[in-house]
Amino acid sequence: MNRLALMVVGGLLAGSALVCGADAPLRPAAGGDVTRVVVVRLQEIFGKYDRAKEMEESVKNAMKPDKDAIDKLDAELSKLTDKMRADSSTNRESLEWFNNVQEVEKLKYRIKLQKEEFTRLFNAQMVTHYKSIFKDFQDAAADYAKANGVDLVLRSAELNELAGENVPAVQS
């Protein structure tokens, strides 16, 4: 199911919960058992979670020298291409022009490789942090469920994969 469909279903569930009085205490129907289910909006929690913001900032700060090095190469490339454009005296079929073009292409390739490596390292560090944060969310949800008699915990298969777990999406 795509994200839009999930958002629509979630909205419908939230709307129906409000209309039906979800804030009212649950009471079993005459002679029936009640299963309590809690739905947590992880994106909202994650966006407001200070530890997540701090972790992201720490990764950005740790990788700032690498980003600055890439920015320096970008500036060097810009300077070299501007110089080539401005220099109308160089014959475009000369060896000097050819060498300058080769230098530009080498620099572009070097920048591309450094950006790819930067992105790979940044994403790897963020995934490590996200796993830690997800574990915090899981622990908090489990504590809340236990303290409030919640019988069923629904878990996203995507989040399970992020956490490196191979567990069913529904646990009781």
Image: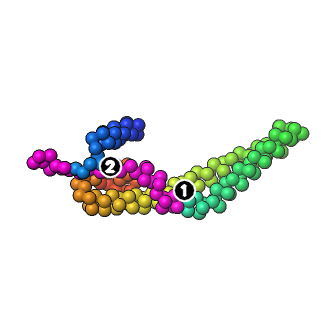
Residue 157 sits above or below residue 16 on the image: below
For the record, the magenta segment spans 27-55
Please, which colouring scheme is shown?
rainbow
Relative to residue 124, is residue 12 drawn left or right?
left
Residue drawn at (35%, 53%) of the image: 160
Q: Amino acid at mark 2?
A: Val
Across and down, in percent, residue 58 comes to 55, 62
Q: CA distance from mark 2 to mark 1?
A: 31 Å
Which amino acid does the dot numbered 1 rest on? Phe
Question: Does residue 136 lie above or below 23 as drawn?
Answer: below
82 lies above or below 162: above
Q: Upstream in the sequence, badge 2 or badge 1?
A: 2
Queried whether the magenta region covers residue 73, the answer comes back as no
Q: Which residue is mark 1?
A: 122
Q: Can residue 35 be seen?
A: yes
Q: Residue at x 36, y 39 (%)?
A: 11
Image quadrant for the C terminus?
A: bottom left
The residue that disc 2 covers is 39
Label 1: element kind:
helix
User: Residue 27 appears at what percent x and percent y?
Assistant: 19, 50
